[in-house]
Amino acid sequence: MPTSFERLVYEKTREIPRGRVATYGEIARVIGRPGAARAVGNALNRNPHPITVPCHRVIRSDMHIGGYAKGADAKKELLIAEGLEIRGDLVIGVPWKF
DNA sequence: GCTCTGACGATTT
DNA sequence: GAAATCGCCAGAG
């Protein structure tokens, strides 16, 4: 069951519009836990709402693809399908500002 | 480019 | 319940 911390993570992640991306650090910051980027990744890793939470739009602060529960490759495809460009492990996109 | 260390919350032991 | 371990990380060296 989701904790309050996880709920906040999912809530913010859901606000990311199609074609935009956000970083783990950004999310950690807006939910009031700056520096807890790892905890955010942990929450998304056990994403209990794969349908409503587009966790594939969350990438690393250096614009790298990072990881993905279903495989980084699938994450790339999803981002490409939303109109983003991926070069190697780099995501060429506009970071979403909460 | 890589490796090491730090920081945070969840899970496991 | 406390300590150890893990994770889709971040920043410095």
Image (cartoon, coloured by chain):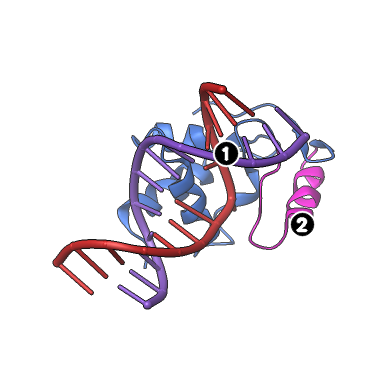
Chain colours: A blue, B purple, C red
Report the amino acid beneath label 1.
Ile
Tell whether A47 sits left or right of A90. left
Q: Give residue A16's mark.
A: 1
| Residue C13 higher or lower than A38, as above or below | above
Q: Are marks 2 and 1 in contact (CB under 8 Å)?
A: no
**x 65%, y 49%: residue:** A56
Q: Note whether residue A54 is visible.
A: no
Q: Which residues are magenta?
A: A64-83
**A33 or C1, which lies in front?**
C1
Tell whether C4 sits left or right of A76. left
Q: Give residue A35's mark.
A: none
- Residue A13 in percent (x, y) is at 52, 44
- Residue A11 in percent (x, y) is at 44, 47
**x 78%, y 41%: residue:** A89
Dot 1: what SS? loop
Which image quadrant for residue A31?
top left
Q: Give residue A74's mark.
A: 2
Q: Tag count in the figure?
A: 2
Which image quadrant for residue A80?
top right
- Residue A78 in percent (x, y) is at 76, 50
